[in-house]
Amino acid sequence: MKKICLLALLAMAHTVSAEEVDVDAIDDSDLPGWAVEKIAPMHDTMTNWVTNSSRNIDGFFGSDDSLKVENNSYLRLSQELEWSEMDDFSGDTGVRFRLDLPTTKERLRFIIESDPEESEGTLAEQGSNRLRNDQRGLGSTIIGLSKLGNRDKTQAWDLQTGAGVKVRWPPDPYVRFTGERLWDLESPWQLESYNRASWFNEEGYSVRSKWDLGRPLDENHHLRFITNVQWQEEVDTLEYSEGVELNQILGSRSVMRYAAVAVGRSASTPRLHDYYLYTHYRRNLHREILFIDLIPELHFPREQNYDAQFGVTLRVEMMFKGDLTFRR
């Protein structure tokens, strides 16, 4: 029954996407006119607030060019509904805001993150990563400064440092070091590396590394092999995961991801203990500001003798970004 449900959801996504291809070329919205009239004023107000706030603060710390250059500040609101055989139904509202300061002399970025990766838990808890995990409450939110690197990561390691506090009482200070690199392998293949070492006063040290090897198969398909390694002081065990993804462009506003992930732990006696099969359908509902995600998943946990556990997540997300232009 679980497999039938999964296949039905996949078939539904494929059917919808096949019908959308011609429509996408004509319009960039699935919403009726009355819904657009309701959304547009609210979106304009919030977008103007994000734009004005970010550019004013950037101008204070940086230069007058803050009114001209691209600014990557944004506000993201999301609503998630999840169902799984283990946890039944649950719903969460998520908020994330990032304030970018592109003209500051030292390339500083002021950040507010409600879903820092250091709070995402173990690799097994992250699972298929179908949840954005930004519903942890104010106690997981961090505020800080990040000094951006000035190197092209295709030519050399791009290094960043950051520091700040987690929003709680008493404040929980943190320090981060991040390094990124991208190699063209003189073929269609590319290898990307992301590495971060962190220290939080409450949680202690953590180190994580991600290696992403991928290549396009054709103009609509992209293949990726992803390796994650993670160590956290409070868990005190080495974790690793191996995943393979096939990403498919279904139309000008729809994409699908098919993925399989295996999660293991321990360096001395390595053992795989969790497996995931999932698909991720994402649709741009309205002019790159309103999105919907449908993510069915089969989880095979070792603690349940690898019996399949079915789950599905439905997420609606709205973006407020000052430099995002769209047609009315």
Image (cartoon, grey):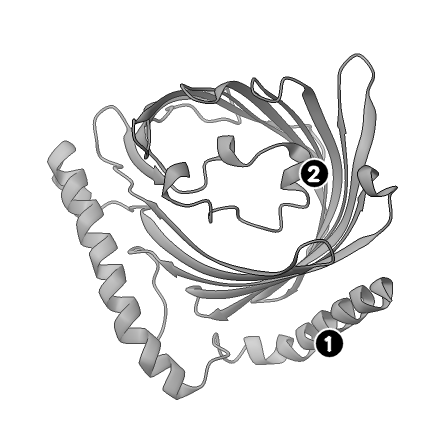
**Dot 1 amino acid type:** Thr
Q: Which residue is drawn at 82% across and 30% down?
A: 272
Disc 1 to disc 2: CB gap under 8 Å? no
User: Where is mark 2, residue-wise?
Assistant: 214
Residue 65 seen in the figure = no
Who is closer to the viewer here, 17 or 155?
17
Q: In this view, does 44 lie above or below 177?
A: below
N-terminal of the pair, mark 1 or mark 2, is 1
61 horizontally vs 190: left or right: left
Q: Which residue is drawn at 72% across and 53% down?
A: 86
Image spot of residue 211 (x, y percent): 65, 28
Quarter location, residue 138: top left
**Dot 2 amino acid type:** Gly
User: Circle 2 sits in a helix, a strand or a loop, which is it?
Assistant: strand
Who is closer to the viewer here, 325 or 307?
307
Quarter location, residue 255: bottom right
Which mark, residue 43? none
Image spot of residue 170 (x, y percent): 29, 26
Nearest to viewer (mark 1 / mark 2):
1
Residue 98 seen in the figure = yes
Image spot of residue 251 (x, y percent): 62, 68
Which mark, residue 15? 1
User: Circle 1 sits in a helix, a strand or a loop, which is it?
Assistant: helix
